[in-house]
Image (cartoon, rainbow, N blue to C red):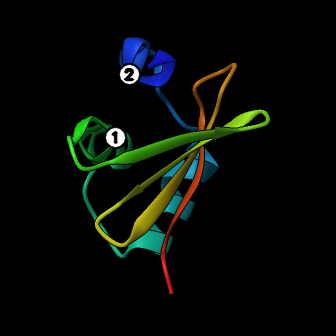
Amino acid sequence: MELLDNINKIHTTEMGVKRIQKNLGIDVEPVEYCVSKIKDKNALIERKGKNYYVTIDGCIITVNASSYTIITAHKLK
């Protein structure tokens, strides 16, 4: 899986940090948090167009497939 092969390239923007923390209700470092979720053996990773969508533990993490930027993450309703 290409996303897992490039796990060390995953990052986010300054605005992304705040958005991810707010959306997931976390106060830990969001990139490390999301990477740990992406690496989880129960994570469902799907590529749709230019993004990867990782579904795990009631949340979805959206990662750009070319830059490996975490765009957003949010809880499933």
The location of residue 40, given as percent across then percent down, is 21, 42
In the picture, residue 32 is in which quadrant? top left
Looking at the image, is 6 positioned above or below residue 60? above
Q: Is residue 10 left or right of residue 33?
A: right
> Which label was assigned to residue 75?
none
Q: Is residue 17 left or right of residue 51?
A: left
Q: Residue at x 44, y 20 (%)?
A: 1
The location of residue 70, given as percent across then percent down, is 56, 41
Q: How would you rate the neighbour count of disc 2 (Cα within 10 Å): few for under 14, some for 14-19, many for 20 or more?
A: few
Q: Residue at x 51, y 87 (%)?
A: 77
Asked if the residues shown at circle 2 and circle 1 are in contact, with their CB atoms under 8 angstroms apart, the answer is: yes
In the picture, residue 64 is in which quadrant? top right
Tag 2 secondary structure: helix
Q: In the image, what residue type sits under mark 1?
A: Ile
Q: Is residue 57 left or right of residue 5?
A: left
Q: How would you rate the neighbour count of disc 1 (Cα within 10 Å): few for under 14, some for 14-19, many for 20 or more?
A: many
Who is closer to the viewer here, 5 or 31?
Answer: 5
Q: In the image, what residue type sits under mark 2?
A: Leu
Q: Which residue is mark 1?
A: 38
Q: Which residue is mark 2?
A: 4
